[in-house]
Image (tube, grey):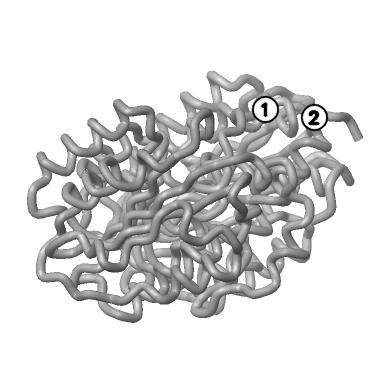
Amino acid sequence: MNAIAMWFGVILACLLIASSSSLPQPSHNLEKRNAPCKVCKQKPLDIAFIIDSSSSVWPENFTLGLWFVQDFVDIYDISPTKVRVAAVTFGDRVYTEQAFHFGDYTEKEALKKAITDLEFMAGLATETGEAIKFYRENLKPEGRDGVKQICVVLTDGNSQDTQKTADEAQLTREEGIEMFAIGVGHSVSETELRNIAGTDNNVMSVSNYDLLRTVKSRLAYKACGSNPIPEVVCRDNPIDISFVVDSSSSIDPNDFQLGQDFLKEFVQTFHVAPDNTRISLITFGNGVYEEDAFDFDTYDEEEDVVNAIRDVPFRAGNYTSTGAGIKYMLDKQMAKARPGVARIAIVLTDGQSQEWQNTYDEAKFAQAAGVSMFAIGVGKVGKQLSMEELEKIAGNSDHVFVAADYNALNTIKFELDSKTCMSVLHTFGQIPL
């Protein structure tokens, strides 16, 4: 195993282990499971959480949010010299009586208990700006000299004074603090989240509190302050990747284009060439649109593949034939996959299929044939999307990604890159799965 692949294996194993716990209860045996995470978890770091406790959150969701924070801090070595954590909640005011400071809890179990002991206050307003100001004036000065400090804002709605929120966040960033914004649900705007974080790269969105676990590894990676994953780690391996893309009428044409943009960016992280990565694509809706498909051997260069994805027309089918799309991918496209290569299929959809049993069966056939299946759902789970269907398509929940809308697809890009890359390295025996 070369040094880069070994480094990637350790980092990625750390992140994927961190993201594998499932709610509704926090994990309690992470110390052993996180043994490979020495690369990042022992770096000195000060992390502050600003947590929405307004009435729109609801008590059970507030608890899920606390468990997310608890599981997140469990990744790190908590001590006076390693990682320290502070937290404050807010609603119609900043609940200063509940806040705890960086020096209050320097042992992991005490810190985790302090997090779960935070009370839901059901505030009748969302004073995010005031909470950021409180952090900057009261918690931030306690940071250690020369130690990175980050601030994570977790909210489900827009603040009462959006300009104040933007101003306070900007002042905080200007003092050298890296801000992260995690939005939950459809009530919080991407603009507000960007105003808090200052950059799209530090914005994360999920459609409900149950899905917070899907952004945990991305947040952990960025909090670590590591350099981006080197593309060379898996991009030069031979890989055949098929996109199975929903083109049904429930998708707006502009959203379909956003999906195309997302796939184009994904392709550009790989080395497209006849001996390296090859790409195929099929769209589906009212059946499969074979006339729009292209196969692994159609295009040999990245630019041609990107242009082909861009030029795929939106068909607005009046049906969602996901199973037919998966069947075409396996029977027609993966039949042309090269022997011994890593084979990956990514299904992108905004809704449930009409023939769900057929979808399950076809996905199972693909998994049995050695195709690593990934499912990306866009929309609200339980309304447009079925988590059960996404998990059946992927074969396991670790290969499922959910974005609140097509504008939020960028929030899952890091983990999709990471987990598809891990699948490739596993195929070639470079890391265990």
Secondary element under disc 1, as helix, strand or loop, is loop
Residue 39 position within the rendered picture, expressed as x and y whole percent measured from the top left: 72, 41
Three-letter amino acid code of the residue under disc 1? Pro
Label whose residue precedes the other's in the sequence (2 or 1): 2
Query: Within 10 Å of the Cα at label 2, are there few (<14), some (14-19), or many (20+) other Cα atoms?
Result: few
**Residue 420 visible at all:** no
Question: Viewer-proximal residue, 78 or 127?
Answer: 78
Res 90 → quadrant: bottom left
Residue at mark 2 to residue at mark 1: CA–CA distance:
8 Å
Q: Residue at x 42, y 45 (%)?
A: 411
Query: Within 10 Å of the Cα at label 1, are there few (<14), some (14-19), or many (20+) other Cα atoms?
Result: few
Three-letter amino acid code of the residue under disc 2? Ile
Q: Quadrant of the C terminus?
A: bottom right
Are circles 2 and 1 on residues that touch, CB within 8 Å?
yes
Q: Is residue 391 above or below residue 430?
A: below
Q: In this view, does 390 lie above or below 119?
A: above
Question: Viewer-proximal residue, 223 or 214?
Answer: 223
Please give the residue where the numbered disc 1 appears in the rendered image. 230
Please give the residue where the numbered disc 2 appears in the rendered image. 4
Q: In this view, does 230 lie above or below 88?
A: above
Res 233 → quadrant: top right
Q: Which residue is drawn at 68% across and 45% down?
A: 42
Residue 300 position within the rendered picture, expressed as x and y whole percent measured from the top left: 66, 22
Residue 180 position within the rendered picture, expressed as x and y whole percent measured from the top left: 38, 43
